[in-house]
Amino acid sequence: MENHCSRQQLKRVEYTEASSPTMSKRLRHEESFELQSEECESELPLLLPSSDSMEKINVLSESGESSGPSASSTSVIGNNYYVFLSFRGPDTRNGFVDHLYHRLKDVGLRFQPNFVFRDDNDLPLGDDIAVNLISAITHSKVSIPVISQNYASSEWCLRELIRIMECKESRGQMVLPVLYKVKPKDVQHLGGSFGEAFRSQEHLFDEEVKQQGKEALRKAAYSRVFESEKYANGREAELVSELVEIAMRV
């Protein structure tokens, strides 16, 4: 990544020197803005993956092909992704999340191939899952955690939500929590079947994830949320459209 950045900066300097004073000034301003954006990335602690790490998706590392969209297309300089989807696969992968993912992908293709990141089961063995996952969240403009009944039973989902809420507070990332067939009070206080799912697995969780995960759930549920059973009287297609519209306005 450093070599790639160095070559880009060298080309920019050569071009600036050969350009008119007005163009030089504008390019130097853009270069300064990009460098400031890189320096502003939060140095947040990395939570290492647990034994169920093969639940995650294949995502390009920061040394991969994508360096993010240009300012003229999405105004997210330096971001590898625009939207990050966090969800519990068995609950929503083949239904609500699948519809949301494809709608986001369709509208985002004109910006870049890696417009949206979602969970899946095809991360090649040996990839540094934790680094790639944290990078995908950190370098996204919008995160949509789809909090379903068994979301809190997954340590991976809690790790994702912890980082998402950290990015909201430290970097101003937009977070659009969807409470999929669960009640806000159950997410806030780990009640009902949602709380039971968490307690059935918490003995397997890292202690830090367990404590921070509870707090991340509480913060997410107390922020602006979209309840799947209440929004548009439960018409999920309308909820998908609303989420896509909001994400595209960021």
Image (tube, rainbow, N blue to C red):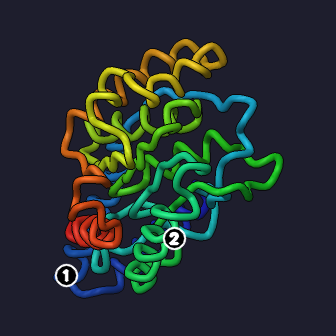
The residue depicted at 17 percent of the width and 82 percent of the height is 22
Left or right of residue 22, residue 98 in this image: right
How far from the left and from the top, in percent, is residue 121? 71, 55
Disc 1 crowd, CA 10 A, few/some/many (<14, 14-19, 20+): few
The first of marks 1 and 2 along the sequence is 1
Nearest the camera: 153 or 169? 153
Q: Quadrant of residue 15?
A: bottom left
How far from the left and from the top, in percent, is residue 117? 51, 61
How far from the left and from the top, in percent, is residue 148? 45, 43
Regarding mark 2 in the picture, which secondary structure is present there?
A: loop
Nearest the camera: 124 or 220? 220
Give the Cα separation between the discs numbered 1 and 2. Answer: 35 Å
Can the viewer see residue 233 in this picture?
yes
Outermost right residue: 125
Q: Which mark is residue 21?
A: 1
The residue tagged 2 is 114
Closer mark to the observer between disc 1 and disc 2 = 2
Query: In this rendering, is residue 110 above or below 189?
Result: below
The residue depicted at 75 percent of the width and 30 percent of the height is 51
The residue depicted at 23 percent of the width and 83 percent of the height is 23
Left or right of residue 103, residue 59 in this image: right
Query: In this rendering, is residue 213 above or below 207?
Result: below
Query: In this rendering, is residue 136 above or below 31?
Result: above
Left or right of residue 47, residue 217 in this image: left
Q: Quadrant of residue 202?
A: top right
Can the viewer see residue 28 in this picture?
no
Disc 2 crowd, CA 10 A, few/some/many (<14, 14-19, 20+): some
Tag 2: amino acid: Asn
